Image: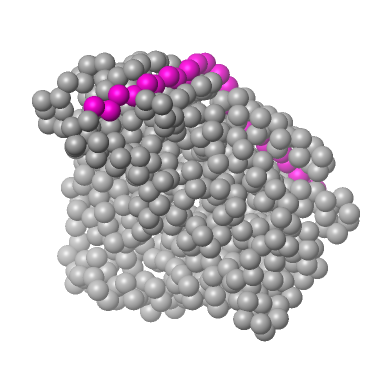
Amino acid sequence: MFLLASACASGAASAATPPLLPEPVIAALANELDGDRAKHDVEVFAQLHRMRASEPFHRATEYIVAELRRAGLDTVEVLRFPADGKTMFGTQKARPAWDAEFAELWDQGTRIASWESMPLSLAQDSDSGEVTADLVDVGAGTREQDYAGKQLRGQLVLTSSQPEAVAPLAVDRFGAAGIVSYAQNQPTAWSREDESLVRWGHLDSFSPRRTFGFMVSLKQARSFQARLTAGETVRLHASVKAQRHPGEYEIVTATIAGADPALTQQQIAFTCHLDHPRPGANDNASGCATILEVARSYAHLIAQGKLARPRRTLRFFWPPEIEGSTLLLNARPDLAKQIIADIHMDMVGGGPRTKAVFHVTRSPASLPNFINDVAEAFTAFVNAESEAFAAGRGSRYPLIAASGDKQALLAQVKEFDAGSDHVVFTDSSFRIPTIYMNDWPDRYIHTTGDLPENIDATKLERAGFIGAASAWFLANLTAEDLPALAALLERQSLRRTAVMLERRGGLPPAEQGALETLHMAYERGVLDSLERWLTVPPAMRATRQRFLGQLAGISVADRSSAKREPPGVVYVRNAEPKGPMSVFGYDYLVDHLGAERAAALALTDYSGLRGGGGEYSIEALNFVDGRRSVRDIRDALAAEFGPVPLEHVAAYLEALETIKVIRRR
């Protein structure tokens, strides 16, 4: 749960001593993985506007299938599920397919936006329409007062908000014909430096309204506003041919079958998300290309006899983001049970121009496990090797692509945060521990600047190595690996303890106790997580228990005189629905509780020391285990993300009880 980020990632491994795996395996993976080959795949994906269940998404799946079959993986197939706007897969309602044929926005004789040249200029889920109309600036456009004194019927609105947020008032209430947005989503320190960038926009996938939205740059919006302020009438012509329609989600999957009959049903998964707008190079062509390169490399090394077939099965998935993972694990419960670890890559190739910081992120504190410690060991190894090479000291495994950069990786290991498919796998419905690799911040995320030219082939190769080495160790884990693994777990526990002690110093006594309790529960859970993989010998368990006793002596202060609160309400999660409450393009809580009541839940917007409302609400549900009381859950959330009012947590859990996600024990 608690990490010593930079120190852990830079100092835990010697450049001369690869961790956990024999050096011939390290060498085989390092020599086979090819960042330039992965970058070529990024360039292919970046030519396609990969919206879920669309024709360009289908072309991307065809490319992946062809590459996997050429590489010789054991099984290659495309799983198909209805994208019809009504079928429920756990907490995800299937969104209808969306395809666009044509979209242009003209200002007199000047074309402002074109689908053909820049698909990002059309908001996702726009519908067909054609109008010549005046442009009316409504500012944010999310409050009725934004429209006071303005005639909107049949006109186009200019807004700083997402089209989805503006449509209920602008279109439904005041009769606007369409929307022109310059919403500055995914803000970073660099968001407004390049005012020519166009950002990704959305409309509601499920709304019966028929309207469209165009996305323009901040520079274009400022030009419109200057003309309007000067009293000029800005008259635009908009033409759109697009539709939502019943279709099919497609998820490519492939396997390298395990060789041990007793273990082959256990699977280590690699996941990414294939959807996102053109170009979408780092987000997320980079992750999709990297796991494709890992799959090819494994298959080639096995075919050459440089690696023996793994004991457990390795499986690869290319779904749409979050919604694809949710529907997959619900529609295929057999896979949900067989996958015992997931390696998720979402944005792993940002070069220097993206300003990206590369993270290897842990599973949430509600899911103690050892696999993140394994990933951090290989991350430290790549950091050390790449830093030695960049500093001119020499390195045996610098992992440099021919066209890539030579700078040190400097990856940071990081505590859980939300924002990608890992939240589905680690959800308490499935409890699949996940190694999540991602870049953040990213200067060009969700903009026309997210181009292949900003992707570093060396970084793709290094991310691929961390994932491939971690999965290979896990796929072949046996009792023979336990001594080295036990030593690693002790070192990691001590690092987490050091961070916990540093955090404890600035907290009031009650919060200190919550921090200590969750810390020790997590460290006990790390050993328990091994039991799904193999039987832990009594001697190792006894040694770990002695170590934890010593750790408790360091970690837990004497609070024997502290006042104990009564346990209070205890909740149990129901068997259905499975998945997190807020997925992609659909919010189960809002749909079942109502928008007004959901908006009143303070926990979903709460900002703590180390997490926001998304993390708090995700983990609040994950901590519901039939043993923790509401106060226990509040304390666990406070320990993980920072102090939070008890009433916020209680109200959120009561809302989940109301919609029958959880029940009182």
In the depicted structure, whether residue 239 falls above or below residue 203: above
Magenta-span inclusion, residue 111: no
Residue pictured at 23% horizontal, 55% vertical: 644
Q: Nearer the viewer, residue 663 or 619?
A: 619
Disc count in the image? Answer: 0
Tell me if residue 223 can be seen.
Answer: yes
- Residue 469, percent from left and from top: 68, 60
Tell me if residue 594 can be seen.
Answer: no
**In the rendered image, which quarter is residue 365 located in?**
bottom left
In the rendered view, how is the structure colored?
one colour
Q: Nearer the viewer, residue 582 or 358?
A: 358
Residue pictured at 68% horizontal, 45% vertical: 41
- Residue 248, percent from left and from top: 58, 22
Residue pictured at 77% horizontal, 52% vertical: 297
Magenta-span inclusion, residue 237: yes
**Start and end of the magenta stretch?**
233-259
